[in-house]
Image (spheres, grey):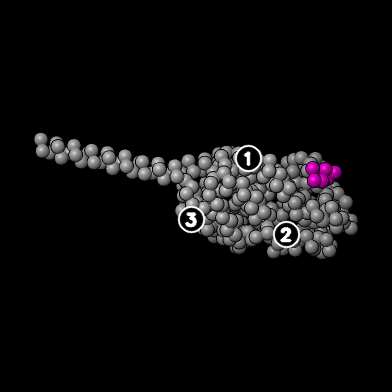
Amino acid sequence: MSFKRTLGRCLCAAVSAFAVCSMTAAAAHAAYPDRPIRLVVPFGAGTSPDAVARVIERGLADRVGVPIVIENRAGAAGNIGIEYVARTPADGYTLLLAGSNIAVANSIYRNLRFDARRDFAPVGMIGSVPSVLVVAANSKLRSVADLAAYAKANPGKVTFASSGIGTTSHLAGELFNRVAGVQMVHVPYPAAGRAMMDIVAGRVDVLFDNLPASVAQLKGGTTRALGVASMERNPAIPDVPTIDELGYRDFTVAPWYSVMAPAGTPPEVIDFLNARLRAVVADPQYRSRLEDLGLKVLPGSPEEMRRFVDAEIVKWGDLVRAVGIHAD
């Protein structure tokens, strides 16, 4: 009887301890968030990703009830900031402003210490911007057909600029090489602004640039747009045809932005953040600010974002391997 009483007391104690732990864990999750959340931008202040982050920060802070602190960790084409977030605790207090580069990095860089699929949990999409094919205002290339014909007749003589190896401007040029059957030569620059300066000066021939970054030059008459790399014409430049409608089917290059968390972040935290992120991009006040930056808003669930990112990894990974792009 003594043994039974002792066993019974032990079982009761274990059950009580389990209940206390469960209540403590539930209380911890219920209290989330109870301190500021960091949103890491893997590029410098003043860049397009930084501008998107600062719009999201304002709306998200109001909805989660704690400050959102933007932290710029630039370097190595965004890889420094991405790796940093991958190594932080999966508690919902450090998030990543992720972009297209995260879907390409593992295909281009052979020695990365993070993996887009393994190390991150999607929180939600923000939006995407179309790429536009631009030339100098005085360029003899008047259309996409002109570009393709001249490049075919003069292999290796047409140059295309980019903002660096593995960027969307680089991949867009390589994709056009492939679908048009031409051999334009890649000229990488350390930043998109430098590439645009040399386009205007006529030192390089063409550039696939983010539309928001190109609008000032297009409206100022220093550059011309030959085509938009999206499935629909863009309201900012409605007279410019899509490259798809010019015969290069499904030619889409649209840099995108999203929010990710370290893998292992509790599902309830992900759902909490996703609901509030979707509320931000649906709010006319913030939606209009994002659209002013040239974004097409793309709200969705974490599962929808996972499928989107997986498709991007496959699409650009196939191109990277076919062309043989690598950065280390």
Snapshot quadrant of residue 304: top right
In the picture, the quarter occupied by the N terminus is top left
Left or right? Give the position of 266 relative to 193.
left
Residue highlighted by disc 1: 299
**Residue located at (65% from left, 60% from top):** 45
Comparing marks 2 and 3, which lies closer to the viewer? 3
Residue type for callout 3? Thr
Q: Is residue 262 magenta?
A: no
Q: Which residue lies furthest to the left in this view?
A: 1
x and y, in percent, of residue 84 in the image: 52, 58
User: What span is colored magenta in the figure?
Assistant: 235-242
Q: How many circles with numbers are drawn on the protein?
A: 3
Q: Residues within 10 Å of mark 1 (few under 14, many from 20)?
A: many
In the picture, the quarter occupied by the C terminus is bottom right
**Residue located at (63% from left, 52% from top):** 53
Left or right? Give the position of 90 relative to 67.
left
Q: In terms of sequence position, does the residue under pointer 1 or pointer 3 come before the other?
A: 3
Residue highlighted by disc 3: 88
Of the pair 253 and 258, the residue shown nearer to us: 258
x and y, in percent, of residue 266 in the image: 46, 44
Specify whether residue 289 is in view: yes
- Callout 1–callout 2 Cβ contact below 8 Å: no
Q: In terms of sequence position, does the residue under pointer 1 or pointer 2 come before the other?
A: 2
x and y, in percent, of residue 79 in the image: 58, 58
- Residue 192: numbered disc: 2
x and y, in percent, of residue 70 in the image: 58, 56
